[in-house]
Amino acid sequence: MSLIEIKNYINGELTSPLSGEWLPNVDPAVGETYSQVPDSDEADIEAAFNAAHQAHPDWASRSAEQRSEILLRIADLIDQNSEELAEIESRDNGKPLTLARNVDIPRCSTNLRHFAATMVAYGSQSHASKGVLNYTLRQPLGVVGIISPWNLPLYLFTWKIAPALAAGNCVIGKPSEITPMTAFRFSQLCQQAGLPNGVLNVVHGSGARTGNALIHQPEIKAISFTGGTVTGRHVASIVAPQFKKLSLEMGGKNPAVVFDDCDFDNKLDKTMLSSFSNQGQICLCNSRILVQQPLYEKFVEALVARTQTLKVGDPREPDTRLGAIVSEPHFRKILAAIATAQAEGGRIRCGGVPLQPSGRCQNGFFIQPTVITDLPNDCSTNQQEIFGPVVTVQPFVDEAHALQLANDSQYGLSASIWTSDISRALRVAENIDVGVVWVNDWLVRDLRTPFGGVKQSGVGREGGDEAIRFFTQTKNISISY
């Protein structure tokens, strides 16, 4: 079987890497290479920059309405091709097709529509005093770089691209080399929509080669990165000394704080989602579940019973709840983390082992969803991000103890709080060290709200006006009269 050849998208054309070097792209559900990805280098990044730099004056001079019209055409094409995009996202990433169909791909067109509308409605500020009028402009930066992850490939790629383009910037985007297929198809849709040449450039390749070339390019004005904390630290070490704008959305070890007066059935339902959606490969997943002591044993028993009913297997099958782990290296990393948990004294209540489905997926990368108890909060398992279908459960005594456990982490991305006491919910939400808190729910997203973390989970905010602010430069003009 011949391999699909993924191409870069530079200056409106689909091109092979200038070096002629390629990377294998594996279908994780079957464990076989089915396409090849450009392993681009500095030459491809320079070609993309030159195209973007040349395109920028025209794109920036267009009205917000004109830019919005093109973004909306791309959104329409995503909707028209949603089933195809869902199928290739599922194949590339290993996630259940139903998840890609119902969540990932619809969110992509929503991203484009939201920021197209946001920029059209965006207003500048003015401040009047006696004899003086100040007004503020927000102007596009120029050429910006975007690095997106493999867990929600097109979802997060468009989440960054949409505000950057809407604000009048030209973009060089580097999707993950592990899941490049929908970004390639998105490039074709941009051609079809009539996006001017050079406004968006998509350059594929490894982080070590392509990503490094992007962050070292001296004339790019900003870098927006989503990925692991170790990689984010490297990105910051290169970009920050260049005095460029930098946004980092990184890892999480997110706590769910479950008080004994919660709506038990609702919490259990949402725990299935917050623990194991996308095989636990979402930065917002609750990987640490903290349960008040009187409810602890009941909760663990019910969680284990429900977890054992989750179907793991072929992503194409409609009743599959967990698909394949995204790659063999990540598959082995998760299994090593589970072995570490056992060595630390953790009790594996269910799962913890690989799974080999029958049929076409017998060589794929599958892990049974795993629940672990009896571990202290300071152990490696409760401190390091695993990013897989693995959760730990710990008891706590009271509100102060819950906050102590929740905040004892190098990460601070998100948390969820489960209680019927609204006063307690507000106190805990105010005092928990994270950037996003959900009360009695999980992953309810409004694209107008700021998104991001604290501590080693990130720098800066995305979403709504925060994204527009990041991708623009502020200029104040003062007029005396």
Image (cartoon, helix red, strand yellow):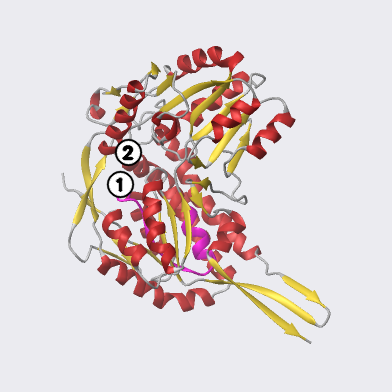
Q: Quadrant of residue 215?
A: bottom left
Q: Which residue in the protein does label 2 denote?
A: 326
- Disc 1 is placed on an element classified as loop
Gap between marks 2 and 1, in whole Å? Answer: 8 Å
Q: Within 10 Å of the Cα at label 1, are there few (<14), some (14-19), or many (20+) other Cα atoms?
A: many
Residue 450 rendering spot, x and y as whole percentages? 60, 51
Contact between marks 2 and 1 (CB within 8 A): the answer is yes
- Disc 2 is placed on an element classified as loop
Residue 383 rendering spot, x and y as whole percentages? 44, 34
The answer, for residue 147, to whether it is visible in the render is: yes
Tell me the kind of residue under disc 2.
Val
Circle number at residue 298? none
The answer, for residue 195, to whether it is visible in the render is: no
Say which quadrant the C terminus sits in. Answer: bottom right
Q: 1 left or right of 240?
A: left
Residue lying farthest right? 130
Q: 1 left or right of 184?
A: left
Q: Which residue in the protein does label 1 denote?
A: 178
Q: Within 10 Å of the Cα at label 2, are there few (<14), some (14-19), or many (20+) other Cα atoms?
A: many
In the image, the segment drawn in magenta is: 159-180
Residue 123 rendering spot, x and y as whole percentages? 68, 67
